[in-house]
Image: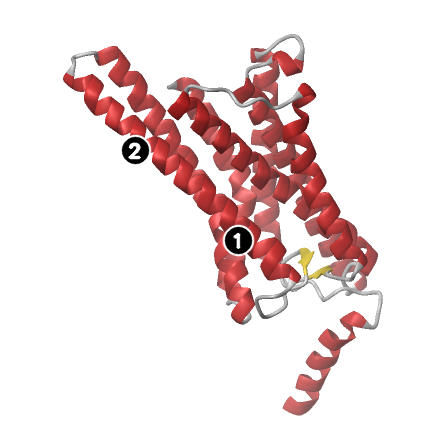
């Protein structure tokens, strides 16, 4: 009996490359519903931030403060990312409950490319914004983003799109254990390791190092200012240090799980708890970003 069950399981997964159906969607219903609800909260926070930004800044968008434009770009990416993710969860859930099957390979390619496209956009925006803030804090210098911010928009949207479409055309976008994404191959010379793990790891390291450097500089300035009895300036630098700390924590939560899971996948199949924690951290990032933005506005 066990041999029959094992053969059935092997056949279920081995047929993924020979049919038009992706790997069966294996997330338990409670996990899918919970993650969808958290993603909806992130969508609500994203909409609230967009409304606040539009009320705060008037006139030509490209004449807004750079930080407000960065925030708008990031929040729009968040909004689309979570909308696509919820669409995939609903689609996969309906497909499984109604037809007892998974989404088609074409649908999986579309979902996977869109999910990863706007996920990587979030990451690239975060890196560029960190570099921009770093130059502003340490050198009091603004980096030129070009006409209509093309130096920001083109690489953020263009580079991931070209890579992901190429991966999809060569059959490297499939449905994994929790979502449609890059094929999870073992080893260190794979699409998943190079274009997913290494890219995210490098980005997280850059963000963490720059934010920590800024935090150290700001804290040193706070100490110097406090010794000269310039209390107002000391308060302002402490507020800046707190903002930097919040961004460090949110980025660690948002992208840290991807680094851990991505490295684990290169060796072996990670435990489901690792996948679920990573999934919830990803869908909750929009809510955390919203809380940080509202907190920063108040301090």
Q: Position of residue 294 (x, y in %)?
A: 46, 24
Q: Nearer the viewer, residue 99 or 199?
A: 199
Residue at x 58%, y 11% (from the top left corner):
57
Q: Total marks drawn? A: 2
- Residue 120: x, y in percent? 62, 44
Q: Is residue 187 above or below residue 210?
A: below
Residue 216: image tag: 2
Mark 1, other Cα within 10 Å: few <14 / some 14–19 / many ≥20 = many
| Residue 24 visible, this angle | yes
Would you say 153 lies left or right of 298 here? right
- Please name the residue that numbered disc 1 is placed on: 258
Label 1 – label 2 distance at C-alpha: 26 Å
Quadrant in which the N terminus is drawn: bottom right
Q: In the image, is 256 to the left or to the right of 176?
A: left
Q: Disc 1 vs disc 2: which is toward the camera?
A: 2
> Picture quarter containing residue 249?
top left
The residue nearer to you, when weighing 101 against 122, is 122
Q: Indicate the secondary structure of the residue bearing disc 1.
A: helix
């Amino acid at each position: 009996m066990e041999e029959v069950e094992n053969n059935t399981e092997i056949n279920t997964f081995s047929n993924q490359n020979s049919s038009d159906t992706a790997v069966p969607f294996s997330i338990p219903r409670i996990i899918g519903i919970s993650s969808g609800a958290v993603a909806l909260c992130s969508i609500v926070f994203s909409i609230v931030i967009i409304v606040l930004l539009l009320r705060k800044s008037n006139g030509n968008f490209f004449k807004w403060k750079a930080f407000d434009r960065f925030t708008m770009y990031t929040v729009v990416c968040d909004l689309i990312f979570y909308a696509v993710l919820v669409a995939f969860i609903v689609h996969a859930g309906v497909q499984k409950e109604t037809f007892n099957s998974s989404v088609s390979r074409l649908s999986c390619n579309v979902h996977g490319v869109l999910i990863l496209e706007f996920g990587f956009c979030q990451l690239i925006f975060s890196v560029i914004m960190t570099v921009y803030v770093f130059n502003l804090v340490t050198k009091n210098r603004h980096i030129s983003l070009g006409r209509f911010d093309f130096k920001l928009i083109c690489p953020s949207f263009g580079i991931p799109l070209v890579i992901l479409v190429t991966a999809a055309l060569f059959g490297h976008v499939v449905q994994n254990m929790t979502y449609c994404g890059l094929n999870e191959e073992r080893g260190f010379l794979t699409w998943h390791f190079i274009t997913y793990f290494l890219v995210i790891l490098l980005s997280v390291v850059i963000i963490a190092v720059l934010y920590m450097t800024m935090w150290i500089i700001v804290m040193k300035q706070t100490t110097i200012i406090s010794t000269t009895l310039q209390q107002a300036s000391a308060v302002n630098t402490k507020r800046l240090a707190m903002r930097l700390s919040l961004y460090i924590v949110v980025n660690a939560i948002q992208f840290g799980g991807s680094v851990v899971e991505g490295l684990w996948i290169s060796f072996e199949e990670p435990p489901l708890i690792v996948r679920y924690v990573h999934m919830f951290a990803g869908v909750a990032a929009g809510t955390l970003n919203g809380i940080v933005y509202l907190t920063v506005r108040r301090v």
